[in-house]
Amino acid sequence: MRDAAWTARMRTEQVRLIYRNYPFTLSANFGLCLLVVAALWNAVPAGILLAWCGLSGALTAKGAWDYLRYRRALSGPVPTDVDAAQQRFATIAWGTGLVWGAAGLAPALLPSSHVHQVLFPAITGMAFGGAAFLSTDRRLFYGYIVPMLGLTLLGVAGMESGARVLFISLTLALAFATLAFAHNVHAMIQRSLTLRFENMDLIDALKLQKEQADYANLSKSRFLAAASHDLRQPMHALGLLFESLRPRIDADPPSQHLLHSITATIHTLEDQFNALLDISKLDAGVIACDVQAIPLWRTLARIEAEFAPVAERKGLRFALHGPAPGTAVRSDAALLDRMLRNLVSNAIQHTPHGTVLVACRLRAGTVRIEVRDSGPGIAPELHREIFQEFYQVQNTERDRSHGVGLGLAIVDRLSRMLDHPVSLRSAPGCGSTFTITVPVCDASSAAAPAGPPAATPATGGLQSLRGRSIAAIDDDPIVLEGMRQLFEHWGCTWTAAASADELLQRLRSGAPLPEIVISDYRLRGGENGAQAIAKVVAFCGRPVPGILVTGDTAPERLREATDSGHAVLHKPVRPGKLRALLLHLLDRSTT
């Protein structure tokens, strides 16, 4: 059952449909009236014709006035004056039916075949025109057609000619055909309006659900960003404090075993946090692609060197069927390497025994890089789900050794960023094959990638930092304590503060001017790290390198930090990475 609101909605749209066709209908009615007057001018007294035409003209003028009066009210997003407009339309419809019904009385009053031949086709046209125009509302249609055809039937019944029976039959047939046509048009309009409103309601419901889903997704992102930041803070401090503690631990085997276990645990947590960060960075669009011609064999050689020993330790066979020598592809070397590393790592992780194979196939200007495994396989209905964040097929217990379910999600995002389609062939018990399709290019344009920089011995790094002046800004006392312990171990001159203003106060009090400034990105009072570093640089009166350390994963925060122009490190920061960046920035500022 439809409720009152639905009924009112249907009635409103019916009135609006009549309103849209009103100008044409009024014009057609009055135009046909003038044609009838012209056709009967010599057959009917002029006074009768002019009176009849004047009445029709008055109705037309009133209809035009009503149309102009209610046009804006009915055409707005929320129609108003619907009842008044409907009543005015009804008055015009009933009046028009009476006017043409009066014309239908002429055969009884004027025994002229010419009059019959003119009026009957005109009344037929008006009847079917009214059926098409007014059938949206049955009350309007009946108020129009009943007086018209009822009076016409009386007129032909009063004829004195022998054609009376024929005209009566034609009038009854016209009434039946008109009513049937009007009912069919009314049913069609009702069905059309019903489908239209149901579709509009469905669209509104889908929009509401989409808005709710977007809001839930935004809330999830905000929660993850806040939780990630809050968890990264103590993780960051833990890594700094542990690095300071490492030299003080005894070298006996039990202590070293404990040291190794703690280090492995910290690194596992860092890797999981970094996977979350990679997703956020991809969503934020802060990762830029450097697409160029690269020799594919170098990328695959790095993959083999890294993962062949891992597979061997697990008892798996790792095989590489590389491309033809000199094959080059157009891609970003680092991002393609990340895609392949994730796929190979995933294959080794989920293959209990057998083989992991990386193979290349040239196909019509592209190379298909396949990563195959002899693992348990994936059911077809799960082929889309496994590329979603945190989805893992066989890790309902959330075993951390299986990762957090972000590797394939990162592959999916990188494939769209690089336009390298990724496909999957797999079935339960038949293993899995992931394929990356990469465009090939001229091998002569492939520049040899620069090799990794030579590792700096730990002692050399400590000596290089010894005596260097470093300032740090962070509003977390635990993080500042961890940094103090670490930098004192490295032999640095150390000045720390919870805000830029506090640091400037210490510099005015005689603290050494910093050679580099490290600042947390999110500080108290709404200040960010980039603004804090700018204050310190302005005080020093010379360029001072800056490092932003952030635990935020929100896309907008990542963009802001990246656009600041300073080096950015993401918590938790491994001390070795921090030391390498410090050495690089200090060396660059010196030269």
Image (cartoon, helix red, strand yellow):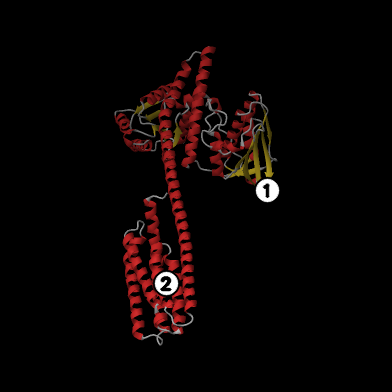
Relative to residue 591, is residue 292 drawn left or right?
right
Looking at the picture, does residue 408 appear above or below residue 365? Answer: above
**Which residue corresponds to mark 2?**
149
Nearest the viewer among 530 and 39 is 39
Is residue 581 something one can see in this rendering?
Answer: yes
Query: The residue tagged with tag 2: helix, strand or loop?
Result: helix
Residue farthest toward the bottom in the current orientation of the protein: 42
Query: Measured along the vertical axis of the image, is residue 281 above or below residue 480?
Result: below
Amino acid type of disc 1? Ala
Is 100 drawn above or below residue 288 in the view shown?
below
Q: In the rendering, at what x and y percent does residue 148 appear?
A: 40, 72
Q: Which residue is mark 1?
A: 364
User: Would you say the residues marked 2 and 1 are in contact, meaning their CB atoms lie under 8 Å apart?
Assistant: no
Q: Give the secondary structure at mark 1.
A: loop
What x and y, as percent, mark residue 429? 66, 31
Q: Quarter-wise, where is residue 527 in the image?
A: top left
Q: Nearer the viewer, residue 333 or 357?
A: 357
Q: Amino acid at mark 2?
A: Leu
Question: Residue 357: percent from the left, percent from the top?
Answer: 67, 33
